[in-house]
Amino acid sequence: MLRKEKTTVFLSGLVLFSIGFVNCAQELPLKELALAKSQVERAERLSAEEFAPEEYSEAKKSLASANEFAAEEKASDSKKSADYAISKAYDALEKTLPKLAAKSREEAVTAIDAADEAYASEYTPEEFKKAVAARDAGETKLAQADASLASYLREDKDETAKELKRTVALQEYEDAHNHFAEASKISQDAKKVALDRSGSIRQSADEVDAALEKAYTYSKGGNPAIDEEKARVASAREDIEAGRLKTADEKIKTARLAAASLLQASVKDHAKNRNGQAREVVEDANARFGELNAETYLKSNAKESYASTQENLGASNESLQASGNLLEQEKFDDSIAQSEEAIRLAEISIDQIETLKGKNNVAKKDRKTVETETTTTTSTTTTEEGDKASSAQVEELSGGWKRYTVEKSNPADCLWRIADREDIYSDAKLWPRIFEANRKSIRNKNLIYPKQKLNIPPKTGKIGKAPKE
Protein backbone atom coordinates (compact mmCIF):
# COMPACT_ATOMS: atom_id res chain seq x y z
CA MET A 1 0.00 0.00 0.00
CA LEU A 2 2.86 2.36 0.81
CA ARG A 3 4.45 1.70 -2.58
CA LYS A 4 1.15 2.38 -4.33
CA GLU A 5 0.75 5.69 -2.52
CA LYS A 6 4.28 6.68 -3.47
CA THR A 7 3.61 5.76 -7.08
CA THR A 8 0.42 7.81 -7.15
CA VAL A 9 2.13 10.83 -5.61
CA PHE A 10 5.04 10.50 -8.02
CA LEU A 11 2.77 10.34 -11.06
CA SER A 12 0.63 13.21 -9.84
CA GLY A 13 3.73 15.32 -9.23
CA LEU A 14 5.10 14.71 -12.68
CA VAL A 15 1.86 15.66 -14.39
CA LEU A 16 1.42 18.75 -12.25
CA PHE A 17 5.01 19.68 -13.02
CA SER A 18 4.34 19.32 -16.71
CA ILE A 19 1.21 21.45 -16.46
CA GLY A 20 3.44 24.22 -15.16
CA PHE A 21 4.89 24.50 -18.64
CA VAL A 22 1.56 25.31 -20.26
CA ASN A 23 2.26 29.00 -20.47
CA CYS A 24 5.76 28.43 -21.79
CA ALA A 25 5.11 25.57 -24.17
CA GLN A 26 1.53 25.22 -25.40
CA GLU A 27 2.50 22.35 -27.64
CA LEU A 28 3.05 19.98 -24.68
CA PRO A 29 0.68 16.91 -24.86
CA LEU A 30 -1.32 17.75 -21.78
CA LYS A 31 -4.34 15.60 -22.72
CA GLU A 32 -2.15 12.58 -23.42
CA LEU A 33 -0.22 13.07 -20.19
CA ALA A 34 -3.45 13.31 -18.14
CA LEU A 35 -4.96 10.24 -19.82
CA ALA A 36 -1.76 8.26 -19.34
CA LYS A 37 -1.71 9.20 -15.66
CA SER A 38 -5.36 8.23 -15.08
CA GLN A 39 -5.04 4.86 -16.88
CA VAL A 40 -1.81 3.89 -15.12
CA GLU A 41 -3.43 4.73 -11.78
CA ARG A 42 -6.51 2.75 -12.82
CA ALA A 43 -4.34 -0.25 -13.70
CA GLU A 44 -2.61 0.02 -10.35
CA ARG A 45 -5.93 0.21 -8.46
CA LEU A 46 -7.29 -2.86 -10.28
CA SER A 47 -4.31 -5.10 -9.44
CA ALA A 48 -2.60 -4.99 -12.85
CA GLU A 49 0.71 -5.44 -11.06
CA GLU A 50 -0.56 -8.91 -10.03
CA PHE A 51 -2.25 -10.01 -13.26
CA ALA A 52 -0.18 -8.17 -15.92
CA PRO A 53 3.13 -7.18 -14.31
CA GLU A 54 5.08 -6.67 -17.55
CA GLU A 55 2.48 -4.44 -19.22
CA TYR A 56 1.94 -2.45 -16.05
CA SER A 57 5.68 -1.93 -15.56
CA GLU A 58 6.07 -0.70 -19.16
CA ALA A 59 3.15 1.71 -18.77
CA LYS A 60 4.55 3.16 -15.55
CA LYS A 61 8.04 3.63 -17.03
CA SER A 62 6.66 5.29 -20.16
CA LEU A 63 4.59 7.69 -18.08
CA ALA A 64 7.68 8.66 -16.12
CA SER A 65 9.57 9.24 -19.38
CA ALA A 66 6.72 11.32 -20.78
CA ASN A 67 6.85 13.61 -17.76
CA GLU A 68 10.61 13.90 -17.95
CA PHE A 69 10.43 14.88 -21.62
CA ALA A 70 7.75 17.43 -20.76
CA ALA A 71 10.01 18.92 -18.11
CA GLU A 72 12.70 19.26 -20.75
CA GLU A 73 10.11 20.81 -23.12
CA LYS A 74 10.54 17.94 -25.56
CA ALA A 75 6.89 17.90 -26.60
CA SER A 76 7.20 15.31 -29.36
CA ASP A 77 9.08 12.81 -27.20
CA SER A 78 6.70 13.49 -24.32
CA LYS A 79 3.66 12.76 -26.51
CA LYS A 80 5.24 9.59 -27.88
CA SER A 81 5.99 8.28 -24.37
CA ALA A 82 2.52 9.30 -23.11
CA ASP A 83 0.78 7.48 -25.99
CA TYR A 84 2.87 4.39 -25.31
CA ALA A 85 2.03 4.58 -21.60
CA ILE A 86 -1.67 4.77 -22.49
CA SER A 87 -1.36 1.80 -24.84
CA LYS A 88 0.49 -0.36 -22.29
CA ALA A 89 -1.93 0.65 -19.54
CA TYR A 90 -4.83 -0.53 -21.72
CA ASP A 91 -2.94 -3.74 -22.48
CA ALA A 92 -2.45 -4.28 -18.76
CA LEU A 93 -6.16 -3.63 -18.11
CA GLU A 94 -7.20 -5.92 -20.97
CA LYS A 95 -5.18 -8.71 -19.42
CA THR A 96 -6.16 -7.88 -15.83
CA LEU A 97 -9.86 -7.09 -15.79
CA PRO A 98 -11.28 -10.39 -17.11
CA LYS A 99 -9.22 -12.28 -14.50
CA LEU A 100 -10.08 -9.81 -11.75
CA ALA A 101 -13.80 -9.98 -12.55
CA ALA A 102 -13.67 -13.80 -12.53
CA LYS A 103 -11.90 -13.79 -9.16
CA SER A 104 -14.36 -11.28 -7.70
CA ARG A 105 -17.26 -13.36 -8.98
CA GLU A 106 -15.90 -16.48 -7.27
CA GLU A 107 -15.48 -14.57 -4.01
CA ALA A 108 -19.02 -13.19 -4.25
CA VAL A 109 -20.51 -16.63 -4.86
CA THR A 110 -18.57 -18.06 -1.91
CA ALA A 111 -19.61 -15.19 0.37
CA ILE A 112 -23.28 -15.51 -0.60
CA ASP A 113 -23.19 -19.27 -0.06
CA ALA A 114 -21.65 -18.74 3.38
CA ALA A 115 -24.33 -16.16 4.24
CA ASP A 116 -27.00 -18.55 3.03
CA GLU A 117 -25.56 -21.31 5.22
CA ALA A 118 -25.71 -18.88 8.14
CA TYR A 119 -29.43 -18.48 7.29
CA ALA A 120 -29.08 -14.82 6.35
CA SER A 121 -32.11 -15.29 4.10
CA GLU A 122 -34.13 -15.86 7.28
CA TYR A 123 -32.49 -13.46 9.74
CA THR A 124 -31.44 -10.58 7.45
CA PRO A 125 -33.59 -11.11 4.34
CA GLU A 126 -33.28 -7.58 2.94
CA GLU A 127 -29.49 -7.54 3.13
CA PHE A 128 -29.30 -11.01 1.66
CA LYS A 129 -31.50 -9.94 -1.24
CA LYS A 130 -29.22 -6.94 -1.86
CA ALA A 131 -26.20 -9.24 -2.00
CA VAL A 132 -27.90 -11.54 -4.49
CA ALA A 133 -29.02 -8.56 -6.58
CA ALA A 134 -25.46 -7.19 -6.66
CA ARG A 135 -24.16 -10.58 -7.75
CA ASP A 136 -26.78 -10.82 -10.49
CA ALA A 137 -25.87 -7.33 -11.71
CA GLY A 138 -22.25 -8.45 -11.82
CA GLU A 139 -23.20 -11.52 -13.84
CA THR A 140 -25.04 -9.34 -16.36
CA LYS A 141 -22.12 -6.93 -16.71
CA LEU A 142 -19.66 -9.80 -17.01
CA ALA A 143 -21.63 -11.32 -19.88
CA GLN A 144 -21.77 -7.94 -21.62
CA ALA A 145 -18.03 -7.45 -21.10
CA ASP A 146 -17.22 -10.86 -22.59
CA ALA A 147 -19.34 -10.01 -25.63
CA SER A 148 -17.73 -6.56 -26.03
CA LEU A 149 -14.23 -8.02 -25.74
CA ALA A 150 -15.02 -10.63 -28.37
CA SER A 151 -16.33 -7.89 -30.68
CA TYR A 152 -13.17 -5.86 -30.08
CA LEU A 153 -10.96 -8.81 -30.96
CA ARG A 154 -12.90 -9.41 -34.20
CA GLU A 155 -12.59 -5.80 -35.33
CA ASP A 156 -9.70 -5.52 -37.84
CA LYS A 157 -10.70 -2.70 -40.20
CA ASP A 158 -11.42 0.41 -38.17
CA GLU A 159 -8.81 1.14 -35.49
CA THR A 160 -10.91 3.88 -33.94
CA ALA A 161 -13.90 1.54 -33.61
CA LYS A 162 -11.60 -1.16 -32.28
CA GLU A 163 -10.24 1.07 -29.51
CA LEU A 164 -13.74 2.21 -28.62
CA LYS A 165 -14.92 -1.39 -28.25
CA ARG A 166 -11.98 -2.18 -26.01
CA THR A 167 -12.72 0.85 -23.87
CA VAL A 168 -16.34 -0.29 -23.48
CA ALA A 169 -15.30 -3.86 -22.64
CA LEU A 170 -12.81 -2.74 -20.01
CA GLN A 171 -15.39 -0.51 -18.33
CA GLU A 172 -17.94 -3.35 -18.28
CA TYR A 173 -15.41 -5.69 -16.69
CA GLU A 174 -14.64 -3.08 -14.07
CA ASP A 175 -18.35 -2.57 -13.39
CA ALA A 176 -18.79 -6.34 -13.03
CA HIS A 177 -15.88 -6.47 -10.58
CA ASN A 178 -17.40 -3.65 -8.52
CA HIS A 179 -20.79 -5.39 -8.36
CA PHE A 180 -19.19 -8.64 -7.24
CA ALA A 181 -17.11 -6.83 -4.60
CA GLU A 182 -20.27 -5.17 -3.29
CA ALA A 183 -22.04 -8.55 -3.14
CA SER A 184 -19.17 -10.00 -1.11
CA LYS A 185 -19.20 -7.19 1.43
CA ILE A 186 -22.97 -7.23 1.91
CA SER A 187 -22.92 -11.03 2.27
CA GLN A 188 -20.19 -10.94 4.88
CA ASP A 189 -22.07 -8.34 6.91
CA ALA A 190 -25.33 -10.30 6.58
CA LYS A 191 -23.62 -13.49 7.72
CA LYS A 192 -22.27 -11.77 10.83
CA VAL A 193 -25.72 -10.47 11.77
CA ALA A 194 -27.28 -13.89 11.15
CA LEU A 195 -24.75 -15.64 13.37
CA ASP A 196 -25.44 -13.14 16.13
CA ARG A 197 -29.09 -14.22 16.01
CA SER A 198 -28.48 -17.97 16.24
CA GLY A 199 -30.12 -18.15 19.67
CA SER A 200 -33.54 -19.09 18.26
CA ILE A 201 -32.11 -22.15 16.49
CA ARG A 202 -30.36 -23.20 19.69
CA GLN A 203 -33.68 -22.86 21.50
CA SER A 204 -35.37 -25.03 18.87
CA ALA A 205 -32.69 -27.67 19.39
CA ASP A 206 -33.36 -27.57 23.15
CA GLU A 207 -37.10 -28.02 22.59
CA VAL A 208 -36.61 -31.03 20.30
CA ASP A 209 -34.12 -32.56 22.74
CA ALA A 210 -36.66 -32.17 25.55
CA ALA A 211 -39.37 -33.92 23.49
CA LEU A 212 -36.99 -36.75 22.59
CA GLU A 213 -35.90 -37.12 26.21
CA LYS A 214 -39.54 -37.39 27.24
CA ALA A 215 -40.15 -40.03 24.58
CA TYR A 216 -37.00 -41.83 25.73
CA THR A 217 -38.25 -41.87 29.33
CA TYR A 218 -41.69 -43.16 28.38
CA SER A 219 -40.24 -45.89 26.15
CA LYS A 220 -37.60 -46.73 28.80
CA GLY A 221 -34.81 -46.35 26.25
CA GLY A 222 -36.03 -49.16 24.05
CA ASN A 223 -36.52 -47.31 20.76
CA PRO A 224 -33.50 -46.95 18.40
CA ALA A 225 -35.38 -44.31 16.37
CA ILE A 226 -35.19 -41.96 19.36
CA ASP A 227 -31.41 -42.40 19.54
CA GLU A 228 -31.20 -41.64 15.81
CA GLU A 229 -33.05 -38.35 16.20
CA LYS A 230 -30.96 -37.42 19.23
CA ALA A 231 -27.86 -37.90 17.06
CA ARG A 232 -29.43 -35.67 14.39
CA VAL A 233 -29.96 -32.86 16.91
CA ALA A 234 -26.38 -33.28 18.16
CA SER A 235 -25.17 -32.94 14.57
CA ALA A 236 -27.29 -29.80 14.18
CA ARG A 237 -25.61 -28.30 17.23
CA GLU A 238 -22.22 -28.89 15.58
CA ASP A 239 -23.51 -27.09 12.48
CA ILE A 240 -24.60 -24.15 14.64
CA GLU A 241 -21.13 -23.86 16.12
CA ALA A 242 -19.65 -23.98 12.60
CA GLY A 243 -21.97 -21.21 11.37
CA ARG A 244 -24.05 -23.55 9.19
CA LEU A 245 -27.35 -22.34 10.59
CA LYS A 246 -29.43 -23.23 7.54
CA THR A 247 -28.24 -26.83 7.57
CA ALA A 248 -28.75 -26.94 11.33
CA ASP A 249 -32.28 -25.60 11.00
CA GLU A 250 -33.15 -28.22 8.38
CA LYS A 251 -31.89 -31.01 10.64
CA ILE A 252 -33.78 -29.64 13.63
CA LYS A 253 -37.01 -29.38 11.64
CA THR A 254 -36.62 -32.99 10.51
CA ALA A 255 -35.92 -34.10 14.08
CA ARG A 256 -38.88 -32.08 15.38
CA LEU A 257 -41.31 -33.88 13.08
CA ALA A 258 -39.86 -37.25 14.04
CA ALA A 259 -39.85 -36.36 17.74
CA ALA A 260 -43.53 -35.44 17.66
CA SER A 261 -44.40 -38.83 16.16
CA LEU A 262 -42.12 -40.75 18.52
CA LEU A 263 -43.43 -38.89 21.56
CA GLN A 264 -47.02 -39.48 20.49
CA ALA A 265 -46.41 -43.21 20.21
CA SER A 266 -44.44 -43.53 23.44
CA VAL A 267 -46.76 -41.36 25.51
CA LYS A 268 -49.73 -43.36 24.27
CA ASP A 269 -48.14 -46.64 25.36
CA HIS A 270 -47.07 -45.13 28.67
CA ALA A 271 -50.55 -43.75 29.29
CA LYS A 272 -52.06 -47.20 28.71
CA ASN A 273 -49.52 -48.89 30.97
CA ARG A 274 -49.88 -46.31 33.73
CA ASN A 275 -53.67 -46.54 33.59
CA GLY A 276 -53.41 -50.31 34.01
CA GLN A 277 -51.06 -49.92 36.97
CA ALA A 278 -53.38 -47.36 38.55
CA ARG A 279 -56.33 -49.72 38.13
CA GLU A 280 -54.47 -52.52 39.94
CA VAL A 281 -53.49 -50.32 42.88
CA VAL A 282 -56.96 -48.77 43.23
CA GLU A 283 -58.68 -52.16 43.04
CA ASP A 284 -56.31 -53.46 45.72
CA ALA A 285 -57.17 -50.48 47.93
CA ASN A 286 -60.90 -51.01 47.32
CA ALA A 287 -60.61 -54.67 48.27
CA ARG A 288 -58.72 -53.90 51.48
CA PHE A 289 -61.17 -51.18 52.45
CA GLY A 290 -64.05 -53.60 51.86
CA GLU A 291 -62.62 -55.86 54.55
CA LEU A 292 -63.05 -53.16 57.19
CA ASN A 293 -66.13 -53.11 59.40
CA ALA A 294 -67.42 -49.58 59.00
CA GLU A 295 -69.65 -49.74 62.10
CA THR A 296 -66.71 -50.67 64.31
CA TYR A 297 -64.60 -47.71 63.22
CA LEU A 298 -67.38 -45.15 63.10
CA LYS A 299 -68.11 -45.84 66.78
CA SER A 300 -64.46 -45.60 67.83
CA ASN A 301 -61.84 -42.88 68.22
CA ALA A 302 -60.61 -43.82 64.74
CA LYS A 303 -63.73 -42.56 62.99
CA GLU A 304 -61.93 -39.50 61.60
CA SER A 305 -59.12 -41.67 60.22
CA TYR A 306 -61.71 -43.99 58.72
CA ALA A 307 -63.51 -41.05 57.09
CA SER A 308 -60.21 -39.70 55.74
CA THR A 309 -59.36 -43.12 54.29
CA GLN A 310 -62.78 -43.34 52.67
CA GLU A 311 -62.37 -39.87 51.19
CA ASN A 312 -58.90 -40.62 49.77
CA LEU A 313 -60.11 -43.89 48.32
CA GLY A 314 -63.07 -42.17 46.69
CA ALA A 315 -60.77 -39.55 45.19
CA SER A 316 -58.45 -42.26 43.86
CA ASN A 317 -61.38 -43.95 42.12
CA GLU A 318 -62.43 -40.63 40.60
CA SER A 319 -58.90 -40.05 39.29
CA LEU A 320 -58.83 -43.56 37.84
CA GLN A 321 -62.13 -42.92 36.06
CA ALA A 322 -60.83 -39.59 34.72
CA SER A 323 -57.65 -41.31 33.53
CA GLY A 324 -59.68 -43.82 31.52
CA ASN A 325 -61.88 -41.13 29.98
CA LEU A 326 -58.88 -39.02 28.98
CA LEU A 327 -57.19 -42.08 27.51
CA GLU A 328 -60.20 -42.66 25.27
CA GLN A 329 -60.05 -39.00 24.21
CA GLU A 330 -56.33 -39.47 23.38
CA LYS A 331 -55.36 -36.82 25.90
CA PHE A 332 -52.44 -38.92 26.99
CA ASP A 333 -50.50 -36.45 29.14
CA ASP A 334 -53.61 -35.59 31.12
CA SER A 335 -54.44 -39.30 31.44
CA ILE A 336 -50.97 -40.02 32.83
CA ALA A 337 -51.35 -37.21 35.37
CA GLN A 338 -54.68 -38.64 36.57
CA SER A 339 -53.20 -42.15 36.78
CA GLU A 340 -50.35 -40.83 38.91
CA GLU A 341 -52.85 -39.11 41.20
CA ALA A 342 -54.97 -42.27 41.43
CA ILE A 343 -51.91 -44.32 42.40
CA ARG A 344 -50.79 -41.74 44.95
CA LEU A 345 -54.17 -41.56 46.65
CA ALA A 346 -54.68 -45.33 46.54
CA GLU A 347 -51.29 -45.93 48.17
CA ILE A 348 -52.17 -43.42 50.89
CA SER A 349 -55.46 -45.23 51.39
CA ILE A 350 -53.72 -48.61 51.66
CA ASP A 351 -51.36 -47.28 54.33
CA GLN A 352 -54.31 -45.75 56.19
CA ILE A 353 -56.23 -49.04 56.00
CA GLU A 354 -53.31 -50.97 57.47
CA THR A 355 -53.01 -48.38 60.24
CA LEU A 356 -56.73 -48.71 60.98
CA LYS A 357 -56.43 -52.48 61.15
CA GLY A 358 -53.62 -52.11 63.68
CA LYS A 359 -55.71 -49.76 65.81
CA ASN A 360 -58.64 -52.17 65.64
CA ASN A 361 -56.51 -55.07 66.86
CA VAL A 362 -55.33 -53.00 69.82
CA ALA A 363 -58.94 -52.05 70.60
CA LYS A 364 -59.99 -55.70 70.58
CA LYS A 365 -57.25 -56.57 73.06
CA ASP A 366 -58.30 -53.67 75.31
CA ARG A 367 -61.87 -55.04 75.40
CA LYS A 368 -60.83 -58.41 76.85
CA THR A 369 -62.07 -58.82 80.44
CA VAL A 370 -60.05 -61.92 81.25
CA GLU A 371 -56.76 -60.03 81.64
CA THR A 372 -55.12 -60.34 85.06
CA GLU A 373 -54.31 -57.33 87.23
CA THR A 374 -50.64 -57.76 86.42
CA THR A 375 -51.35 -57.80 82.71
CA THR A 376 -53.53 -54.73 83.09
CA THR A 377 -50.81 -52.94 84.98
CA THR A 378 -48.21 -53.92 82.43
CA SER A 379 -50.48 -52.83 79.59
CA THR A 380 -51.13 -49.52 81.28
CA THR A 381 -47.45 -48.96 81.84
CA THR A 382 -46.68 -49.79 78.21
CA THR A 383 -49.43 -47.46 77.02
CA GLU A 384 -48.11 -44.65 79.20
CA GLU A 385 -44.61 -45.17 77.88
CA GLY A 386 -45.99 -45.09 74.34
CA ASP A 387 -47.83 -41.87 75.08
CA LYS A 388 -44.65 -40.37 76.44
CA ALA A 389 -42.76 -41.44 73.36
CA SER A 390 -45.53 -40.02 71.21
CA SER A 391 -45.63 -36.74 73.07
CA ALA A 392 -41.86 -36.58 72.96
CA GLN A 393 -42.13 -36.43 69.18
CA VAL A 394 -44.37 -33.35 69.25
CA GLU A 395 -43.22 -30.10 70.83
CA GLU A 396 -45.69 -27.27 71.33
CA LEU A 397 -44.61 -23.86 70.02
CA SER A 398 -46.28 -20.46 70.12
CA GLY A 399 -49.00 -19.31 67.74
CA GLY A 400 -50.47 -22.79 67.30
CA TRP A 401 -47.25 -24.14 65.80
CA LYS A 402 -45.69 -27.48 66.75
CA ARG A 403 -42.35 -29.14 66.11
CA TYR A 404 -42.34 -32.81 65.16
CA THR A 405 -39.25 -35.05 65.39
CA VAL A 406 -39.20 -37.81 62.78
CA GLU A 407 -38.50 -41.25 64.23
CA LYS A 408 -37.67 -44.60 62.75
CA SER A 409 -40.86 -46.66 62.82
CA ASN A 410 -42.85 -49.28 60.96
CA PRO A 411 -44.68 -48.18 58.91
CA ALA A 412 -42.14 -45.45 58.17
CA ASP A 413 -42.95 -41.82 58.92
CA CYS A 414 -44.07 -39.77 55.92
CA LEU A 415 -45.74 -36.40 55.57
CA TRP A 416 -49.28 -37.71 55.13
CA ARG A 417 -48.93 -40.09 58.13
CA ILE A 418 -47.68 -37.20 60.25
CA ALA A 419 -50.61 -35.04 59.09
CA ASP A 420 -53.00 -37.91 59.91
CA ARG A 421 -51.82 -38.12 63.55
CA GLU A 422 -54.45 -37.14 66.09
CA ASP A 423 -51.95 -34.80 67.80
CA ILE A 424 -51.23 -33.06 64.48
CA TYR A 425 -54.17 -32.59 62.05
CA SER A 426 -56.05 -35.93 62.04
CA ASP A 427 -56.26 -35.37 58.30
CA ALA A 428 -53.75 -36.92 55.87
CA LYS A 429 -54.81 -34.56 53.08
CA LEU A 430 -53.23 -31.63 54.92
CA TRP A 431 -49.67 -32.93 54.43
CA PRO A 432 -48.92 -30.15 51.85
CA ARG A 433 -49.05 -27.61 54.74
CA ILE A 434 -46.17 -29.42 56.44
CA PHE A 435 -44.27 -29.65 53.17
CA GLU A 436 -44.74 -25.94 52.46
CA ALA A 437 -43.62 -24.93 55.95
CA ASN A 438 -40.42 -26.99 55.66
CA ARG A 439 -39.35 -26.38 52.05
CA LYS A 440 -35.85 -25.37 53.11
CA SER A 441 -35.22 -28.72 54.82
CA ILE A 442 -37.37 -31.00 52.62
CA ARG A 443 -36.35 -31.13 48.98
CA ASN A 444 -38.23 -34.34 48.18
CA LYS A 445 -41.69 -34.58 49.70
CA ASN A 446 -41.37 -38.38 49.71
CA LEU A 447 -38.07 -38.39 51.60
CA ILE A 448 -37.71 -37.49 55.29
CA TYR A 449 -35.30 -39.07 57.74
CA PRO A 450 -35.16 -39.99 61.45
CA LYS A 451 -34.27 -37.21 63.92
CA GLN A 452 -35.32 -34.59 61.34
CA LYS A 453 -37.28 -31.78 63.01
CA LEU A 454 -40.31 -30.50 61.11
CA ASN A 455 -42.22 -27.31 61.85
CA ILE A 456 -45.97 -27.99 61.92
CA PRO A 457 -48.11 -24.93 61.11
CA PRO A 458 -51.64 -24.48 62.48
CA LYS A 459 -54.32 -26.58 60.80
CA THR A 460 -55.96 -23.58 59.13
CA GLY A 461 -55.02 -20.10 57.97
CA LYS A 462 -51.98 -18.67 56.24
CA ILE A 463 -48.87 -20.74 56.86
CA GLY A 464 -46.33 -17.94 57.37
CA LYS A 465 -43.07 -18.61 59.25
CA ALA A 466 -42.46 -20.84 62.26
CA PRO A 467 -41.64 -19.10 65.56
CA LYS A 468 -37.96 -19.13 66.60
CA GLU A 469 -38.22 -21.35 69.66
Image (tube, grey):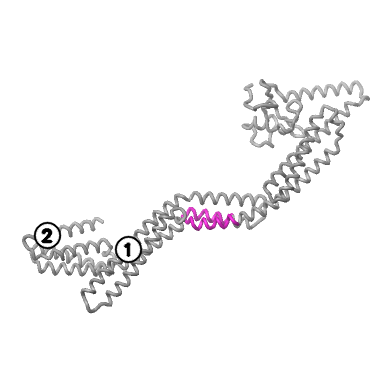
Q: Is residue 1 inside the magenta stretch?
A: no
Which quarter of the image is occupied by the C terminus? top right
The picture places residue 64, in percent across and down from the top left corner, at 16, 63
Q: What is the three-letter code of the residue carrying label 1?
A: His
Left or right of residue 39: residue 294? right
The picture places residue 231, in percent across and down from the top left corner, at 57, 56
Left or right of residue 344: residue 441? left
Q: Quadrant of residue 343?
A: top right
Q: Is residue 444 above or below residue 371?
A: below
Q: Residue at x 65, y 27 (%)?
A: 462
Badge 2 density bin: few <14, some 14–19, many ≥20, Cα 10 Å: many
Could you tell me which secondary element the residue under label 1 belongs to? helix
Q: Residue at x 83, y 34 (%)?
A: 357
Q: Residue at x 84, y 30 (%)?
A: 298
Write down the residue under mark 1: 177
Left or right of residue 407: residue 137? left
From mark 1 to mark 2, how far is it between C-alphas?
33 Å
Badge 1 density bin: few <14, some 14–19, many ≥20, Cα 10 Å: many
Which quarter of the image is occupied by the N terminus? bottom left
Q: Is residue 156 above or below residue 458?
A: below
- Identify the magenta region: 230-257
Q: Is residue 452 above or below residue 219?
A: above
Proximity of marks 1 and 2: CB atoms separated by less than 8 Å: no
The picture places residue 49, in percent across and down from the top left corner, at 26, 64
Residue 19: assigned label: 2
* Viewer-closest of 341 and 405: 341
Q: What is the three-letter code of the residue carrying label 2?
A: Ile
